[in-house]
Amino acid sequence: MSNLEGYWKANTSLIRNLLIVWALVSYVLGILLAEPLNAIRLGALPLGFWFAQQGSIYVFVILIFYYAWKMDQLDRQYGVHE
Amino acid sequence: MSVEAWTYLIVGITFAIYIYIGYASRVRETAGFYVAGRGVPAIANGAATAADWMSAASFISMAGLISFMGYDGAVYLMGWTGGYVLLALLLAPYLRKYGKYTVPDFIGDRYYSHTARAVAAIATIFISLIYVAGQMRGVGIVFSRFLQVDIATGVIIGVAVVAFFAVLGGMKGITWTQVAQYTVLIIAYLIPAIAIANVLTGNPIPQLAFTFSDLVSRLNQIQVDLGFTEYTKPFQGKPMIDILAITLALMVGTAGLPHVIIRFYTVPDVRSARYSAGWALLFIALLYTTAPALAAFARYNLISTLHGKTLEEVRQIDWVAKWEKTKLLAFVDKDGDGKITVAPGRAFALKGGKPDFNTPDEKSKNEVHIDNDIIVLSTPEVAKLAPWVIALVAAGGLAAALSTAAGLLLAMSSAISHDIYYRIFRPNATEAQRLLAGRIVILLAVILSGYFGINPPGFVAQVVAFAFGLAAASLFPAILLGIFDKRMNREGAIAGILVGLIFTAVMIGMMRAPQIFGAPAPVIPNLFGISAEGVGVIGMILNFVVAYVVSRATPPPPEHIQHLVEDIRIPKGAGQAAEH
C-alpha cells in the first residue's frame, strides 16, 4: 500500500506544480500584471495582452502533454500501468 | 459557379458524409450507444472533443465579440481553453478509470445515493438543454445567412441530420461524425484567416502576423485617434475582479460540462484519456489562437475601409453592399456630411436588446453598426477569396453547430434514459430495453431542441452564463472531491451541490432579472463587482466550503466507497472495468 501512497503523492505534487504554472500564465501574467507587463513588448504586441490572448493558451497545451508524458513514467515506475 | 451553388454543393457533400458515417457506425448495444464501445483512439477523441466543444458561437461569433472587446475578450480565450488543463489533470483520467457511462453515474455511485444521482442528472439535463437550444438556432441562422432559406427550414434540416446519426449510432455515430466535422470546421476557419493575414501583413500565419507585424500598433493608433482607448489596453469594459471571476468561472465550468466529460469515457484506457485531453486542447487552440488575430485584422480592416469615406464610395465595395442588405452592417449619416464616422458608442438605439434601425442613437457620433458575426462571415470576401471558400465557411459553421448539438443531446438523453430510467427506476431493464429507451429519448431530445431552435425562448441567449455557472458551482466540485477527498461523504456532497446550485441560480436570476423575468431593472447589478457570468465562482467556493464542513460533521463514507476511491486513483485495470 505504501507503494501506491507514494504514487499518489508523486501524482498530486506534479498536479500542484503544473497548476501553479497554469495560474501564473493566465491569472498573474495575463490579468493581474497585464497593465504593467503591457509596457514590455513581445514582437509588436504588449506582453500582458500577448499572455492573455495567445501565450497562456500555448502554455495550457504544453502543460497537458507534459502531464501525460510524466505520468507515463510514474505509472511504469510504480507498476500501475495497463 | 455562384456562391449559392457552391454552398449547396459543399454543404450537401458534408451532410452526405455525416449521414454515411452515422450509418456505418450504427450500434446494437448500450456500451456502443453511450461510450462508443470505449474503442476511440486518443487523437480521434481529441478531434471529436474539439468539435463537441466548439459551437456555432465559437465559430461565427467569438472573433467578432473579441474584436469589439479588445483585451477584455481574453476572458473567453483563456476561459474556454484553460478548463482543459483542469479536466486533464483533475478529472478525465479518474472518471475514465471509474469507467461507467455518465456524470450522474459517478456522482450517484461515489456518494452511494440516488438523491445525489438525481440531482446530478437534473443539473446535466438543465445545463445541456440551455446550451442546445442555441445550437439549433445557430444551424438555422447559418442556413438563412448563406442560402436565404428561412430559419425554421434550416433548423428542420439540421434536426433531421442530427436525428439520423445520433439515434442510429449513439455515441459511436456522434464521435466519428464529430471527427469529420472538426476537419471541416478547422479548414473553413483557417483558410480565410490565413488569406486575410497575408493580404494585410504579408505574413500568412495568423498567429505570427498578429504578434510580429505592426498591424496591432497601427490599430491602437487609429483607435486613439478616433476617441476609443487602445485595443490592447486591459479592463476597459469590465473591472479586473470581474475579468478574474469570469475567466475562472468559464474554466471550471468547461471542466464541469457533462457533454465534454463524457467524451473521455470513450477512450480505451487512462493513458489515452490524458493524451486525448492534450489533443483536444491542441485542436481547439488552433482556432482559439487564430480568433484573436482575426479579430484584430478585421477590426483594423473595417475601420480603415469605412472611416472618412463617403457612403457612395463604400457601397461600391461588394461585401459592404452584400452585408448592408442583411443588416449585419448598417449606416446612418447623423451629421449630414455624407461621410462615414467611426466612433465609440452605438450607431442606433437599442430596442429589446437589438438595434432599432429607424432610431439613430444621438448620444454617439458613431455612424456604423457592425454585427459581431460579420467579422468571420465577411473575411473571405474581404480577402477576395474564391466563392467556394465562402461556401466552405457556411459548411464550417454548420459543422460546428451540429457537432456541439449532437454531443449535448447525448449527454442530456443519457441522463434521462440511463441515470433516471435505468439506474433509479428500472434497474432490471434488459439490454434491449435500455438501448430502445436511449434511442427514444435522444429522438425526443432532438425534436425538443429543434422546437426551441424555431421558437427560441427569449431568455436563452441571456442565460448561457447559467450553463457555465451551474456546472462550476455543482458538478465540478462534487466530482473533484469525489476523487481527491476520500473522506468526502454523501451528506457533504449533496449539501455542497445544493448550496452551490441554489446560490448561483438565485444570483444569476437577480442579476439578469430584466432578461429572464422581464423586470424593469436587475435586483442587484453585481456582487462585489462580479457579474452574472462570473458569479458561479462564488457558488463553487461555497460548494467546497459547505461540502467540507458538513462531511466532517457526519460519518465517513462506507468502506467499499473508500476502496472505490483508491481504485480509481490507479490506472491499472481500466480495460476490465469497461466490461461491467
Image (cartoon, helix red, strand yellow):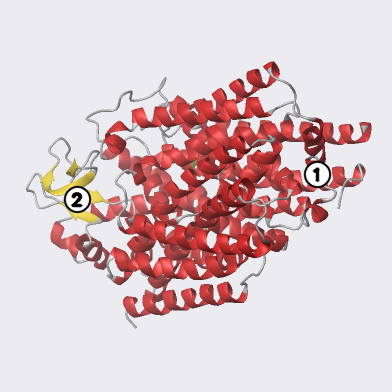
Q: Chain of mark 1?
A: A
Residue B291, position as x, y percentages in the image: 46, 52
B1, above or below B437, in the image: below
Residue reaching furthest to the bottom: B1
Residue B337, position as x, y percentages in the image: 8, 49
Q: Amino acid at mark 2?
A: Gly
Residue B244, position as x, y percentages in the image: 50, 29
Circle 1 packing at 10 Å, graded few (<14), some (14-19), many (20+), is few
Q: Are marks 2 and 1 on the same chain?
A: no
Task: In the rendered structure, find residue B233 and report the number of the disc placed on it.
Answer: none
| Whether residue A46 can be seen here | no
- Residue at 68% x, 61% y is B31
Q: Chain of mark 2?
A: B
Residue placed most toward the observer, B212 or B17: B17
Residue labelled with disc 2: B308
Residue labelled with disc 1: A70
- Residue at 66% x, 34% y is B480
Residue placed most toward the observer, B90 or B222: B90
- Residue at 21% x, 41% y is B346
Q: Amino acid at mark 1?
A: Lys
Residue placed most toward the observer, B177 or B451: B451
